[in-house]
Image: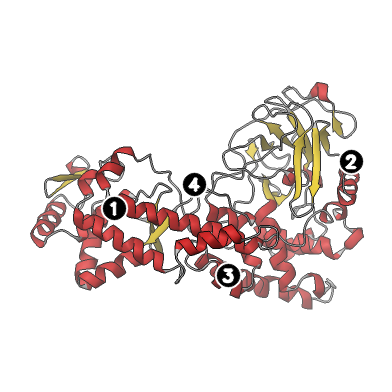
């Protein structure tokens, strides 16, 4: 039997023109939240839900639109204000039935206390990112929201617009918002946000037709594309397929089961759709996929992790590499070798301000790191010859067929495939072991075995923050152990290693 809040939400959806298949069951489980299950077999291409754009909570539909536009509150900043504004209206808000279904905030790290962040995320790919995010979010509130509370004509209730409410709204946006179209931008999409995530197991696809206002092309909706974590996958979007399949317009709010086959609609750009992309068995939960994300990204954006997530990575910062180098060589040596590495056409991930190298789930290091270490460890004579050859070639490796010669080895430009075996000298492998130890030390005094034991004792229901932070920590530390194995037995591992999944860490961006 549906919970009281679900029954109220269903009534609200009907009043707003939502349509959903009678094959969907919304399940409200204490401690686990809401899930969507299939009451019967669903076929690929079935349209299982349609959501009116005007019923979505956006900066264009909110009653705060005039304030948002007058104050120039763009993007997620404006959407956060819209959420706070509608919450301040209580039962007078057109979205009251929807807002009552939402938690006050999602348990993402930006709403954790600073002490919790420092204790639970220490050493992980999230630690510094969340610290910086919390500071930036506070500055956004102080500079853009706080001044509005003093404007007499607005009469905003400070209780609903304080820093705690702003963080809460930002957490909902991080975990639940979708990109609707070029006119509405990002927004809260009721019903669509009830489908839970499972990596690599997408059952339904969120589709936004082109806007009635300005857009001239179809737009795939994506779940919150604000910048993320140091390791993040090239921000995977909630929607990865261009599907404009729809059903004919129906009377009432439930999509009749006979009309769930994929018949093309008349390009109704006022509606959003959830479409099955594969067959779904009766009785199973129906999942959406937020992207192929590692645990750092999942925890950062959505507040949960997944055991044995094959998209996890660990980053070795350039700063850590230079720190190792300074312990063995002079600063002049380090600068010259890095400069040569760059002139050969190589680069790390990130930017000049935040550069890093990725270690894949299998423990395989990014080839650019191996090349840098090889150059760092070159004897002076070999370094001088390579430096001269690059200078003669006009600092352009491409002019030599995309390659430069080093100690009898060929170093292709980064776009070329290259055997790592030739780079795994004993000195390079020893350096990888040192870097793994340096990276490991960031987690503190507890061993990985200590963390694994703590995770086994931890209760997800009672200690959610601790549980997910331990999953993140243990998975990252297991990757570092795989890196040690890789460096200890390079040739055997190199033969069997799988292609490295190309992931990216978060770029932090302010709206």
Single out the mark in the foreground, 4 or 1: 1
Give me the C-alpha separation between circle 2 and circle 1.
60 Å
The disc, 4 or 3, on the residue closer to the chain's N-terminal end is 3
Q: Is residue 412 visible?
A: no
Q: How is the image coloured?
A: secondary structure
Q: Which residue corresponds to mark 2?
A: 14
Query: Which residue does the image show at 85% across and 73% down from the upper left?
Result: 155
Instruction: Give percent across and percent down for residue 270.
Output: 77, 38
Q: Is residue 141 above or below residue 171?
A: below
Instruction: Give percent across and percent down for residue 502.
Output: 43, 45
Q: Which residue corresponds to mark 1?
A: 487
Q: Which mark is residue 117?
A: 3
Q: Which residue corresponds to mark 4?
A: 311
Foreground pick, 312 / 510:
312
Q: Is residue 152 above or below residue 428?
A: below
In the picture, residue 131 is in which quadrant?
Answer: bottom right
Q: Is 484 placed left or right of 2 in the picture?
A: left
The disc, 2 or 1, on the residue closer to the chain's N-terminal end is 2
Q: Is 162 placed left or right of 234 in the picture?
A: right
Instruction: Give percent across and percent down for residue 132.
Output: 54, 69
Foreground pick, 103 / 464:
464
């Amino acid at each position: 039997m549906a919970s009281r809040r679900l029954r109220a939400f269903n009534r609200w959806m009907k009043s707003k023109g939502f349509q959903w298949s009678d094959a969907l069951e919304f399940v409200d489980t204490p401690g686990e939240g809401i899930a969507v299950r299939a009451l019967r077999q669903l076929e690929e291409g079935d349209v299982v839900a349609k959501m009116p754009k005007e019923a979505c909570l956006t900066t264009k539909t909110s009653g705060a639109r005039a304030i948002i536009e007058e104050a120039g509150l763009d993007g997620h900043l404006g959407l956060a204000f819209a959420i706070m504004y509608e919450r301040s209206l209580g039962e007078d808000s057109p979205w009251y039935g929807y807002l009552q279904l939402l938690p006050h905030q999602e348990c993402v790290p930006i709403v954790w206390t600073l002490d919790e962040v420092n204790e639970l995320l220490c050493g992980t790919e999230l630690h510094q990112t969340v610290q910086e995010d919390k500071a930036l979010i506070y500055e956004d509130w102080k500079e853009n929201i706080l001044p509005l509370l003093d404007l007499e004509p607005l009469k905003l209730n400070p209780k609903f617009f304080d820093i705690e409410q702003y963080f809460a709204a930002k957490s909902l946006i991080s975990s639940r918002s979708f990109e609707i179209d070029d006119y509405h931008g990002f927004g809260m999409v009721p019903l669509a946000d009830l489908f839970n995530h499972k990596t690599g197991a997408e059952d339904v696809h969120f589709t936004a037709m082109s806007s009635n206002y300005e857009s001239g092309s179809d737009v795939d909706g994506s779940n919150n594309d604000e910048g993320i974590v140091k390791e993040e996958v090239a921000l995977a979007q909630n929607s990865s397929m261009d599907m404009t399949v729809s059903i004919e317009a129906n009377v009432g709010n439930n999509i009749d089961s006979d009309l769930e086959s994929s018949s093309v609609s008349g390009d109704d750009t006022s509606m959003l759709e959830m479409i099955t992309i594969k067959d779904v068995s009766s009785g199973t939960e129906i999942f959406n996929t937020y992207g192929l994300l590692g645990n750092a990204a999942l925890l950062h954006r959505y507040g949960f992790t997944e055991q044995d997530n094959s998209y996890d990575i660990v980053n070795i910062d350039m700063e850590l590499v230079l720190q190792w180098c300074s312990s063995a060589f002079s600063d002049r040596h380090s600068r010259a070798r890095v400069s040569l590495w760059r002139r050969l056409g190589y680069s790390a991930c990130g930017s000049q301000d935040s550069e890093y190298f990725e270690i894949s789930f299998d423990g395989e290091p990014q080839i650019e790191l191996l090349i840098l270490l090889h150059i760092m460890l070159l004897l002076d004579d070999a370094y001088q010859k390579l430096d001269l050859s690059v200078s003669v070639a006009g600092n352009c490796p491409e002019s030599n067929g995309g390659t430069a010669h080093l100690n009898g080895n060929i170093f292709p430009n980064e776009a070329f495939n290259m055997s790592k075996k030739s780079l795994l000298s004993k000195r390079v492998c020893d350096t990888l072991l040192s870097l793994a130890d340096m990276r490991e030390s960031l987690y503190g005094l507890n061993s990985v075995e200590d963390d694994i034991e703590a995770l086994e004792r931890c209760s997800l229901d009672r200690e959610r923050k601790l549980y997910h932070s331990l999953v993140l920590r243990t998975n990252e530390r297991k990757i570092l152990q795989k890196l040690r194995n890789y460096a200890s037995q390079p040739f055997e591992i190199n033969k069997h290693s799988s292609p490295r999944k190309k992931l990216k860490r978060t770029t932090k961006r302010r709206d």
